[in-house]
Image (spheres, rainbow, N blue to C red):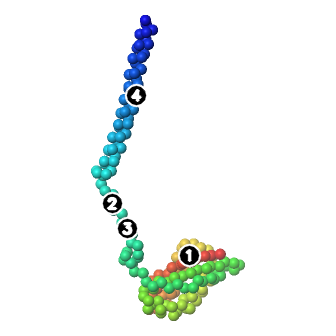
Amino acid sequence: MADDDAKGADGADEPKKKSKKILFIILGVALLVLGAGGYFAYTKFLAPPPPPIEKPAEHPAEAGETVGEIIDLEPFVVNLADPKGNRYLKMKISLEVESLEMSERVKKVTPKLRDTVIMMLTSLSFEEVMTPEGKLRIRDELLERFSRITKPDKIKNLYFSEFVVQ
């Protein structure tokens, strides 16, 4: 009889354990659903709206900067000042001027501009040309020299469209 009581007691305890497991599972799922619903409600209804994204100007003219006329010079291929003479520089330059009339005047002095570029580039070494600072120095010096040639007109900017050293 003691064995029957033990079996009965064990049998009675088992359903209670199963019901506790099911209860914990239901509570866990309910907490997850409530948490997800709370997050959704907060993000949709209570959270402050994100700041507006500023769209960058598509054209420089919209940003307040006016773009002038662009003049493309023929590519330059020159020997650099290398003792062995094995280094070459191929460069293509584009000039930005203020107006179409100025563009026509600059085109008339293109041979002088090309001569200036060739004379300057052939005096440079490979080390002077390869650094970013060297490229900026070349741009600044060419702008200054071009401005002297095209006086009273002024070149707004100078762009390297190609810059290859071999």
Expressed as whole percent of the image width and height from the top left, the position of residue 49 reads: 31, 56
The amino acid beneath tag 4 is Lys
Query: Would you name the residue on which mark 3 appears?
Result: 55
Expressed as whole percent of the image width and height from the top left, the position of residue 141 reads: 52, 82
Please tell me which of labels 4 and 3 falls first in the chain. Answer: 4
- Mark-to-mark CA distance, 3 and 2: 12 Å
The amino acid beneath tag 3 is Lys
Please tell me which of labels 1 and 4 falls first in the chain. Answer: 4
Q: Is residue 30 above or below residue 134?
A: above
Q: Tag 2's secondary structure?
A: loop
Cβ–Cβ under 8 Å for marks 3 and 2: no
Q: Nearer the viewer, residue 44 or 92?
A: 44
- The quarter of the picture where the C terminus appears is bottom right
Query: Would you name the residue on which mark 1 appears?
Result: 134
Q: In the image as oriented, which residue stretches furthest toward the top?
A: 1
On the rendered structure, is 76 left or right of 84? left
- Mark-to-mark CA distance, 4 and 3: 55 Å
The amino acid beneath tag 1 is Gly
Q: Is disc 1 surrounded by few (<14), some (14 to 19) or many (20+) residues within 10 Å?
A: some
**What residue lies at 47% left-to-right and 89% top-to-bottom?**
103
- Mark-to-mark CA distance, 1 and 2: 42 Å
